[in-house]
Image (cartoon, helix red, strand yellow):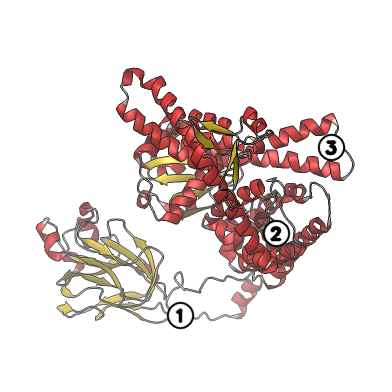
Amino acid sequence: MSHQQLARQILDLVGGKENVNSVFHCITRLRFKLKDETRAKTDELKNLDGVVTVRQSGGQYQVVIGNHVPEVYKEVTAIGGFSSRQEQDEVEEEDKGNLLSRFIDLISGIFTPILGVLVAAGMIKGFTALFVALGWLTNTGGTYQILNATGDALFYFLPVILGYTAMKKFSGTPFLGIIIGSALVYPALSTITAGEPLYTLFAGTLFESPVFIEFLGIPVILMTYSSSVIPIILASFFAAKVERGFAKVIPIVVKTFLVPTLTLLVVVPLTFIVIGPIATWAANFVGQGTIWVYDLSPIIAGIILGAFWQVFVIFGLHWGLIPVAFNNLATQGFDPILAMIFAASFAQTGAVLGVWLKTRDPKLKTLSAPAFISGIFGVTEPAIYGITLPKKKPFIISCIAAGIGGGMIGLFGTKLHVMGGLGVFGFPSFIHPVEGMNTAFWGFVGAILVATILGFVLTYFFGGVNKDETPEVKTNSTAKRNVTIDSPLKGQIVPLSEVSDQVFASEAMGKGIAVLPTEGRVVAPVTGTITTLFKTKHAIGLSSDEGVDILIHVGIDTVQLDGEHFTAHIKQGDRVNAGDLLVEFNIEKIKEAGYELVTPVIITNHSNFAGLEVTKVAAVNTNDPLITIKAPEEKTVEISGNNLADLRA
């Protein structure tokens, strides 16, 4: 399927472009913010060729595509015309969901647009450190200086880049964010601190700060903002609010230049005087706090983070730790958090290798190969959603292996020194900038090997790869004995031939009987699985454990009510027991709307059986016998010498 064709089908199945507030992508997923997620056809999307799975988390409707998601995203935005619409819709659409969901959506929205270049810069910086450690380069040579500048530029000017993405996320003018971020790292300001301070604020306290300059007589506490994260995000949030405030009161004739002028004159000084220092102090506190927790027991911290990291990824909660890691790098010069979770992707990859070599399923074997290759390079969503999670045990095993690997990384005290690449490309990020490949680095390598081998071996021998782990439900079998279908409703019996809808009366849909309900409740007539629940809730399809397929159609033409006066208590795919409440409906309201309530109960696969008998009584209660399905007779074949020879032949 072409990327354009896939994009069209995805847009159609999420409810059309009119149902999309915004869309962006990460390494493997299209991340939609939909106006109404119930309009999306999730099951159809999951089964669409080119889609790995669908996840709903953090206020986002995430369609997992795989490695070619940028191409699909390009087609989605082109077809949907989201480039201009998206920004307008984000201004109009208020954030919804709980505080955690909104925070995750905020962080992912700010960092996802730069993820690709972030990884690229980290890889260049990491490999430059590796080349120095191996003696291939010296840190005084021109080659090193240029490579280091290439890799370090993004991190040094991170406030500038985050100023753009944060302002866009907060629905402000992105270029205002660039200017605010640029002011924070303006070189001339950093040279001022070389002289003697004018005076010192908060002397003798934790917040003691020398003052070198003033703004309109107000003391300015100069700090180092290169590579920082929290100050520019807070400044951008405030700037977006200020910009919208000025836009409401300034005349349209001068709005184009006066709004940005006043916004910068307010926000930049305020950032240096108030927002920057407070955010930096807060960042230092968070950084020291995480290191303190880590120092309490790095082994336990590594086990917990390693084991649960993939669960965090599934629910999108991993984004909550990204700013903490960036903050640690900026304030401490290293980060232990992302070091301890690094084994998780390799444990997952090892588990996929176990599935690949063990499975006898050709389709699963075909899927495992590219998932394994992606996992080697740190992209594990295809492995998680396509292979290990559906098989359950391999996913659990990978979590256990990742926990052991994370504990080992904590034991050796390995730390991340630069935000680098994924998978094997991330190894140079753990080389100490001064000590080189020290014990902590080699311990990290050993932990990765252990996690990978454990994931592979445990999955291969104990992963139940060739065992169907779903509960055995004989929905496709044919009953070997008579089966009684209970009445799903209380009411008067109506022969099917007397139903006003000729589709039912002619038995074109199948054989059965109808009930004129006197109570607005539908219960399960059998123990089995809900195979169909129309969105209008007026029709339910079930398949019994004995293989009998049943359709319950409440009323005639009630589909036109579009679900009004109906309440569903189940969803498609649910397991139910006989007598469980399925749907409630308001008899009087449906009658007032002008619709008949005669409810056909149809056996749609009656031809699989020897026959059926319907009840002879005039009225039934729920759970009374309604239809008896006769099992097909078992046939015996006498084998004579002649046809035995034929069989052998």
The residue type indicated by label 1 comes to Glu
Q: Name the residue under label 2.
A: 343
Q: In the structure shown, which secondary structural element does the residue marked by tag 2 occupy?
A: helix
Does residue 270 sit above or below 490 in this rendering? above
| Quarter that holds the N terminus | top right
Q: How crowded is mark 2: few (under 14 residues within 10 Å), some or many (20 or more)?
A: many
- Report if residue 48 is visible in the image: no
> Which numbered marker is on residue 139?
3
The residue type indicated by label 2 comes to Ala
> Which numbered marker is on residue 621?
none
Q: Which is more toward the observer, 485 or 574?
A: 574
Q: In the structure shown, which secondary structural element does the residue marked by tag 1 occupy?
A: loop
The image quadrant of residue 344 is: bottom right
Q: Name, please, the residue furthest toward the top.
A: 253
Q: How far is disc 3 from disc 2 in space, using C-alphas? A: 30 Å
The image quadrant of residue 504 is: bottom left
Q: Which is more toward the observer, 355 or 634?
A: 355
Q: Where is residue 644 in the image (x, y as percent from the top left)?
A: 62, 77
- Mark 3 or 1, nearer chain start: 3
Can you tell which of label 3 and label 1 is closer to the viewer? 3
Q: Position of residue 304 (x, y in %)?
A: 62, 66
The residue type indicated by label 3 comes to Asn
- Mark 3 or 2, nearer chain start: 3
Q: How far is disc 3 from disc 1 in space, using C-alphas? A: 85 Å
- Report if residue 109 is visible in the image: yes
Residue visible at 59% across and 39% down? 199
Does residue 389 sit above or below 581 in this rendering? above
- Mark 2 or 1, nearer chain start: 2
> Which numbered marker is on residue 634?
1
Does residue 380 sit above or below 191 in this rendering? below
Q: How far is disc 2 from disc 1 in space, using C-alphas? A: 57 Å
